[in-house]
Image (tube, helix red, strand yellow):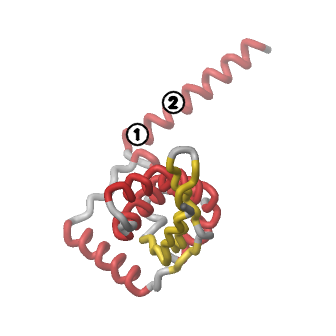
């Protein structure tokens, strides 16, 4: 009985290997060559995607206000409060909502180090650089293509001393 089982197993392995080799040589199934698109087809596809994207209005996901403490020595010298909205497309809203805790954590971690350096160089927050930074951190955290833009609705600097 064990000899027959070993022989049957060997035959099955040989047949599977032969089937894979046949598919590879005939360029069938997963071994099919990729279809090469002409530059005109690529341009037409890009134009169609741009047209579809232009027709769809953007969606905004609102985050809870982010509070970033600014330390001076061992005490909190000021608190920055940011109200942020994330611009995205309709299909990505649920994906962003699922990733919201990770996204808020990444924003707070980065801004905790970035804002004090920014305020050392300038007196006020640079909203444009802040938006770019939040966009990059968001894409790095939850993936490229989910976030189309970041809107900073309000930025308040409350000095405690």
Residue extending farthest to the top is 3
- Element under disc 2: helix
Give left or right: position of 146 versus 104. Answer: left
Between 37 and 46, the one nearer to me in the picture: 46
Residue at the spot 38% in from the left edge and 67% down from the top edge = 124
Q: Earlier in the sequence, mark 1 or mark 2?
A: 2
Q: Say the numbered circle drawn on residue 17.
A: 2
Q: Residue 133 versus residue 121: which sits nearer the camera?
A: 121
x and y percent of residue 146 in the render? 48, 65
Whether residue 98 is situated above or below residue 2 in the rendered picture: below
Q: Quadrant of residue 53?
A: bottom left
Q: Position of residue 113 (x, y in %)?
A: 46, 50
Q: Residue furthest right?
A: 1
Which quarter of the figure has residue 26? Answer: top left
Residue indicated by mark 1: 24
Q: Which mark is residue 156?
A: none
């Amino acid at each position: 009985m064990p000899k027959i089982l070993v022989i049957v197993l060997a035959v099955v392995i040989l047949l599977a290997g032969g089937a894979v080799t046949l598919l590879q040589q005939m360029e069938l199934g997963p071994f099919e060559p990729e279809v090469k698109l002409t530059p005109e087809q690529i341009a037409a596809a890009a134009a169609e995607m741009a047209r579809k994207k232009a027709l769809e209005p953007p969606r905004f996901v609102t985050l809870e206000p982010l509070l970033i403490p600014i330390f001076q020595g061992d005490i909190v010298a000021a608190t920055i409060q940011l109200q942020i909205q994330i611009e995205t497309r309709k299909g990505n809203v649920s994906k962003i909502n699922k990733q919201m805790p990770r996204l808020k954590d990444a924003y707070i971690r980065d801004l905790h180090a970035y804002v004090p350096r920014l305020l050392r160089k300038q007196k006020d927050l640079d909203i444009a650089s802040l938006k770019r930074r939040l966009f990059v951190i968001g894409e790095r955290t939850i993936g490229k293509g989910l976030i189309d833009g970041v809107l900073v609705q309000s930025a308040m600097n409350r000095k405690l001393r």
